[in-house]
Amino acid sequence: MCGIVGYIGNREAAPLLLESLKKLEYRGYDSAGIAVLSNGQVTIRRCQGKLANLEKILLQRPVRGKIGIGHTRWATHGKPSETNAHPHRAGEVVVVHNGIIENYLELKEHLLKRGARIESETDSEIVAHLVGEKIQKGMDFLTAVQKSLKQIHGSYALAFLNQKSPDRLIVAKNSTPIVVGWGEGESFVASDIPALLDYTRRVTFLEDGEVAEVTAEGFRILDEKGKTIRRPHKEITWDAVAARKGGYRHFMLKEIHEQPRALADTFRGRISLREGEVSLEGVHLKAGEVKQIKRIHLVACGTAWHAALVGKFMLEEIAKIPAEVDYGSEFRYRSPLIDSRSLLLLISQSGETADTLAAVDMGRAKKAKIISVCNVVDSSLARKSDGVLYTHAGPEISVASTKAFSTQLTALYLLAIGLGRLSGRLKRADAKRLLQDLMHLPHWVEEALRLEGEMEKLARELCGAADFLYLGRGINYPIALEGALKLKEISYIHAEGYPAGEMKHGPIALVDEKMPVVVLLPKDRYFQKTLGNLKEVESREGKVIVLTDEGSGPIGATAYRVLSVPKASHFLTPTVLTIPLQLLAYYIAVHRGTDVDQPRNLAKSVTVE
Ligand code: AGP
């Protein structure tokens, strides 16, 4: 899940590649590099760490040339270091790669036997050697790439530069995205559209197995057999809003505060309160099809998986359709019982998560209907699905997902109501009531954001803790998981989310006076039960932090802290409870001085297995 870019035309390549890479830094920031060709010489500048480091190097040692490739890396094979940074060179050939070459060890062994000098620990360098050795034997650039691709197994988006071919770049794709942009006398290559939008809106996506020969005048796409493919370009009409922090210290805080607006954008224009109907335009499901669905399989990763867990409650209780939830990485390797009466519901902010995307192919093979809930317009997932419900959260820059999560919850709520109405299993009057509730959601979230001061204070008190526990029940149990994940990823504190009732079966052994235990305790059908679990923690001297929609009342007497969120309806309470947990994780990370928006070892978009 690295970012790759390429350019050929009349402009200086280096500054353009750098600017384009900045739009892809969400894909990884372990190292960065560019290669530029001029006067028969390729110059490579690369370094460990973020693009800012590369920018400094380029200021001190600029490179000139009108054709080049660039890369920002999330390390998979080989630690983050300058040697492992892309581009990689072998003879005349230079390559940047996103993906994983699964048979690289075997290939490496053969290359070493043939005398190749392999410098890095990466799987990617192997590809440069495969192409380089063929060119050295006299093969032309394109054929050498095509033949090398036949030797590799795995996922790749590749861009090649050849010292002896100053008039072309070659790119190839399998399982990870690559898009080519059309300009006037210039062409662009990138992993993702935002990297191109400053230069062109005319783009063509490559499909799996394809190779493209990119020149300043345009490009030629070839399929696996070498046959030329004619594919019309696509005009990108949306804007990658120049993501700025807007006065906030971090993107994460800005995105937390954007939630009331983002949630309204998710449902705006999709509901009719008078009719009690939801318009699922874009989802392309007819009433007859919905009635035929016997099971919904929700598949997602990370935070989106937590949204899927909440979605299961909504789909079963509102739409009355059985639902099950899988991690993308598990679903792809088990044998789920899916057929033409199954609905695959994939949830992803980026729409580029490899494990989630893999479910599409499985669903296709079994003739299931494939719907996605996605934030990024025209992402791979959106393009591959039969229908999409966009969350309209706007660009999410911080690696830790906040507004993408809450808008996924809203989209799933809309979907549950819409499917319930289409199947006839949800009465119009009930749908009207659920939609009325939704109208209040932005306001409830706004109110919950007022807890910011208190969460900051609490964060200051708790930021030294080594472990945290988050407890919830029923539809709010996934929110305990999400609260723990947020804390882990940005503060590096160990945290676990647990169903409150499961505590006594093991995790209670961890509780002592140093352990903060965050208990989600809305006044719902589980209130008394969860209260009982809270008392169990207190009797082991755990530091109980209660999030409730009741007044502090009797809970307050013994708890370390009680914080009140506004009372919301049953299905929308998870969204409201999420807000203080996001703020708590954020301020703990700030107090610990971590890199909040780009936490260590993570990337925003996980395009590898
Ligand atoms: C969220 O805070 C995480 N960074 C991560 O778990 C993320 O939700 C996951 O990688 C899935 O991403 P996606 O929604 O883009 O598919």
Image (tube, rainbow, N blue to C red):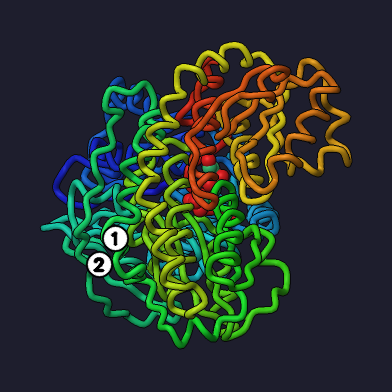
**Local crowd size for mark 1, using a 10 Å CA cut-off: few (<14), some (14–19), many (≥20):** many
Relative to residue 602, is residue 377 drawn left or right?
A: left
Question: Viewer-proximal residue, 506 or 44?
Answer: 506
Looking at the image, do the residues carrying marks 1 and 2 touch, with CB atoms under 8 Å apart?
A: yes
Answer yes or no: is residue 487 visible: yes
Q: Is residue 116 above or below residue 133?
A: above
Which percent across, then down, holds residue 73? Answer: 48, 40
Mark 1 within 8 Å of ligand 1, using the beta carbon: no
Relative to residue 158, is residue 154 drawn left or right?
A: right
Helix, strand or loop under label 1: strand
Residue 180: image tag: 1
First in residue order: circle 1 vs circle 2: 1
Q: Residue at x 43, y 66 (%)?
A: 431
Which percent across, then down, holds residue 587? Answer: 51, 20
Q: Residue at x 60, y 59 (%)?
A: 313
Q: Residue at x 63, y 72 (%)?
A: 322
Question: Viewer-proximal residue, 258 or 430?
Answer: 430
**Local crowd size for mark 2, using a 10 Å CA cut-off: few (<14), some (14–19), many (≥20):** some
Measure how far apart labels 1 and 2 are at the Cα level: 8 Å
